[in-house]
Amino acid sequence: MREPDPEHWLYRYTPREWLRASMGELEQARRAYAAHNGRAGLAGCRRAAGVSLNGWLASLDPPPEAYGRSYMDHLAALAVDEGAPEAVRAAAVLLRQTPLPGGEIVALRTATTDARALDAAETIMAHAYAGVVRAEP
């Protein structure tokens, strides 16, 4: 595992620090949904998943280039990564394809759709956590 490098976007935190940060993002998403702010809730779910994937990527040497740099790049790559379990790929697809409320498309939100986004983020976070643990000495 690499030493933290504050100048590098991926290595500024250790893999475990990225995972802890993702838990904070998920908590913000939960609070946003509880406040009926679907836009912030979905964005928070995407960030939570992407930040956890940063942790997994930081644990790899080298990280796969296909995963890019942004959390949406990470989700796009994960959605088609044949090495990832089907449930994890499906979670990435759900987070990518769910439209943000307030755009040109009117998305009807329910507690069930909010829960699906939270579940998808948690599924990806668990996958990233398992990857980090596997990479540790």
Image (cartoon, helix red, strand yellow):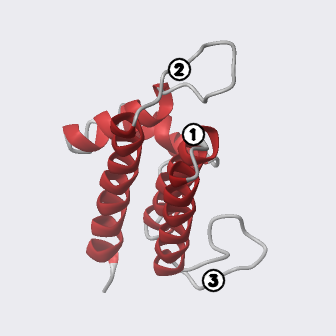
Mark 2 falls on what kind of element? loop
Q: CA distance from mark 3 to mark 2?
A: 41 Å
Q: Which residue is mark 2?
A: 107
Q: Nearer the viewer, mark 3 or mark 2?
A: 2
Nearer to me, 118 or 124: 118
Q: CA distance from mark 1 to mark 2?
A: 10 Å
Using the image, determine if residue 10 lies above or below residue 2. Answer: above
Amino acid type at image mark 2: Ala
Of labels 1 and 2, earlier in sequence is 1
Residue 89 on image: x %, y %: 31, 37
Amino acid type at image mark 3: Pro
Q: Which residue is mark 1?
A: 38
Residue 45 on image: x %, y %: 50, 49
Mark 3 falls on what kind of element? loop
How many numbered dots are placed on residues in this image?
3
Q: Which residue is mark 3?
A: 4
Q: Is residue 1 visible?
A: no
Mark 1 falls on what kind of element? helix
Using the image, determine if residue 40 lies above or below residue 107. Answer: below
Q: CA distance from mark 1 to mark 3?
A: 34 Å
Amino acid type at image mark 1: Gly
